[in-house]
Image (cartoon, helix red, strand yellow):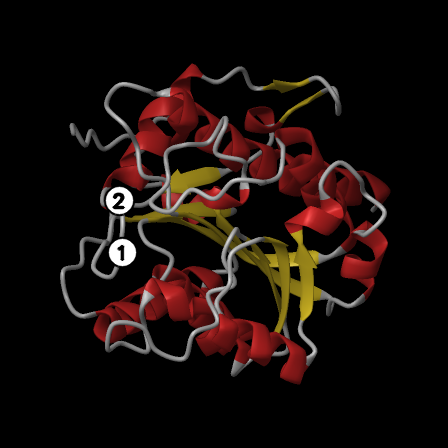
Amino acid sequence: MENKIKTFAGLEEDEKSYPSSEIVLLPVPYEKTTTYIKGTEHGPFAILNASPNLEFYDCDLDFVALNHAKIATLPPLLLKNDPEDMVKNVAEAVENIVKDNKLPIVLGGEHSITIGSFRGVNNHYKDISVVQLDAHADLRDAYEGSNYNHACVMRRIAEDAHICQIGIRAIDEEEAKIIKENDYDVFFAKAIVNNNSWHERALSGLKDNVYLTFDIDVFDPSFMPSTGTPEPGGLGWYEVLSFLKKLVMKKNIVGMDIMELCPMNNNKGPDFIAAKLLYQLITYVTYKKTLHNNDI
């Protein structure tokens, strides 16, 4: 698979782009602990390569985020070390972005990257909620000999933050027990598909500062097959965007990531969908800031 390194939306980059930016994309093409279909290391490049082909006008908001957003795309963070060391490297890189008063959006790669990205944000903000959209709970304490496996992401994060899990539909017995014992905020896919009655309940339990981690397999595999462990019964495009828009508008998003895109050579549609998801998140963040600036 060809990994062309491009900026998001084909934006020109120069030495001044990072200092003036407000949103910073950090590609982390790391894959070490995936257990079924391999290829998430190509995910960040697939998103960036697809992004110049988007239409950038938002019909719902009557808004073009690229006319307002200041975006920088950093060179990919190329890591081949063990997951625990990778987490430390990602945490340092993300914390540097946050210290510069910018919003980090990490593009993976396998989901274990999120542990580092969260820690980089949490080192600065503290007291945050982590919202996870995912097919899997990722609450195992260890998997295949590692506490930093992609199946352990939310177990590590829950040690330091309040978590809210959305779209879950694949867990094992250990995870089911943990959810019950800790009374985690879990919104199972079966209960939320095709309705938004759960939105306010999910939002009301969150702290003001929110880190969003988005595993692409939360989408139904009928239109998002490009993931390492596709699960039937997933969420649809509009129901996901409906919640994300409310989340961004009502909470202070301090960091985000999009993980687990496993691109296919013969189907580029899912790459485009992931790039569109990224742009929608940028749109919501930018639109909210524009409203705030107009109120000042």
Q: Left or right of 89: which side holds 282?
A: right
The residue lying toward the viewer, choosing from 108 and 294, is 108
How many numbered circles are shown?
A: 2
Alpha carbons under labels 1 and 2: distance apart? 7 Å
What residue is shown at x 43% (from left), y 68% (from top)? 153
Residue 34 numbered mark, or none = 1
Residue corresponding to mark 2: 37
Query: Residue 92 appears at what percent x and percent y?
Result: 33, 70
Residue 97 falls in image quadrant: bottom left
Residue 228 falls in image quadrant: top left
**Are there few (<14), some (14-19), or many (20+) residues within 10 Å of tag 2?**
few
Residue 193 falls in image quadrant: top right
Dividing the image into 4 quarters, which one contains the N terminus?
top left
Residue 187 numbered mark, or none = none
Task: State whether residue 213 is above or below residue 117.
Answer: above
Looking at the rendered structure, the secondary structure element under dot 2 is: loop
Task: State whether residue 220 is above or below residue 133.
Answer: above
Disc 1 marks a residue whose amino acid type is Thr
| 1 and 2 marks in contact (CB < 8 Å) | yes
Disc 2 marks a residue whose amino acid type is Ile
Q: Left or right of 288: which side holds 73?
A: left
What residue is shown at x 22% (from left), y 74% (from top)? 85
